[in-house]
Image (spheres, rainbow, N blue to C red):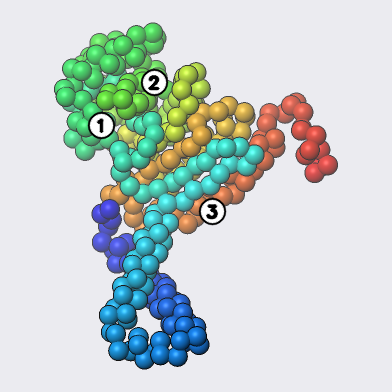
Amino acid sequence: MKFPIPLLKKYYRDLLISGVPTFFCVLGVFWLLIEMLTFFIPDTMQWTADNFWVLIICSSVALVVTIIDIRRKFKEMFSVRESLADTNISLEIQVGDIFQVEGDFIIGTDTTFETNPIPEKSLQKQFTDKYYDNVEHLDRDLANALGDEKLIENTSGKSKRYKIGTVAKVSPKKQVVYLVAIDELNKEGEVVSSLENVRDSLRELWKYIRRDIDINNLVIPIIGTKHARIQIPRQVMITEIIESFLEVTYQGTLICEKLTIVIAKEDYDENIDLKKLGDYLHVNAAKKRWQEKPAGQPVPAEHQNEH
């Protein structure tokens, strides 16, 4: 994976330093085995010294083990994951390419579900280019998906406009994608949105998915912080997504068994602290499901003595 050069320099330095003990630890295991064999076969040490290729093999194995360990640590540096208390549900935050993560994608769009033109670098554009041969095919899928949705007004540009939070489910090339309206186009054709729009959109999205027959893993980017131009730090938006998902999940609604929040590689910089996000996720995921239920609902018997 390609990451910003300053971060790579920092992490690779730390990882290489951490790999040195692993390398010598593996060599130490081989040395211990040789000494143990020497106890039973006295000539083992001399035989090892005379056959230099044995040392080369041992060093090579140690190097391979070290590389595997470094790769594991490298992956952990760009991913945090927690399981929610009393559930089979997990939530992960990772740096990478959303299209390389297994699950149903969630992609933000505007209330007209505009497909042409759209910003070249937008996630919707990347999705369209990857999964559709032409925009007309996407338009047909959107028309079918939005057939029963209520219009709120006619606008110039596109003749249809829907409310914030409207969801269109499409499945090009067997890839399920939920396009959710999180922003609007003003009279000048500029994209406008707000944090409240994102909150409303997420609530409507969870309702929509809850009604779906299939329960699959979900994959969501940091919506709203780029082309929707919502001026809040990406780290804050990640916590908003987490809070929204936990709120509906801890109320007893099964949305999915795993939600993955993907930070685009080009968006991952010093302003996003995965460790702090991991701590935040750990604290919130550890809350008991029964503690989060609305007032008036009985507390399970096994927890009654905890008050």
Q: Which residue is mark 2?
A: 167
- Asked which quadrant contains residue 300, the reply is top right
Task: Please tell me whether mark 1 or mark 3 is closer to you in this view.
Answer: 1
Q: x, y (%) of residue 7? A: 32, 62
Up-down: is 49 above or below 81?
A: below
Q: Of the residues shown, which amino acid type is indicated by label 2?
A: Val
Secondary structure of residue under mark 3: helix
* Residue 127: numbered disc: 1
Q: CA distance from mark 1 to mark 2?
A: 16 Å
**Residue at the limit of the structure toward the right, as seen here:** 305
In the image: residue 86, left or right of residue 116: right
> Mark 2 or mark 1, which is nearer the start of the sequence?
1
- Given residues 75 and 167, the one toward you in this image is 75
Q: Of the residues shown, which amino acid type is indicated by label 1?
A: Phe
In the image: residue 225, left or right of residue 92: left
**Residue at the limit of the structure toward the left, as seen here:** 134
- Given residues 97 and 225, the one toward you in this image is 97
Q: x, y (%) of residue 109? A: 32, 27
- Asked which quadrant contains residue 274, the reply is bottom left
Q: CA distance from mark 1 to mark 3?
A: 32 Å
Instruction: Give me the residue at 42% from left, 78% from top.
Output: 30
Q: Which residue is mark 3?
A: 279
Report if residue 125 is visible in the image. Answer: no
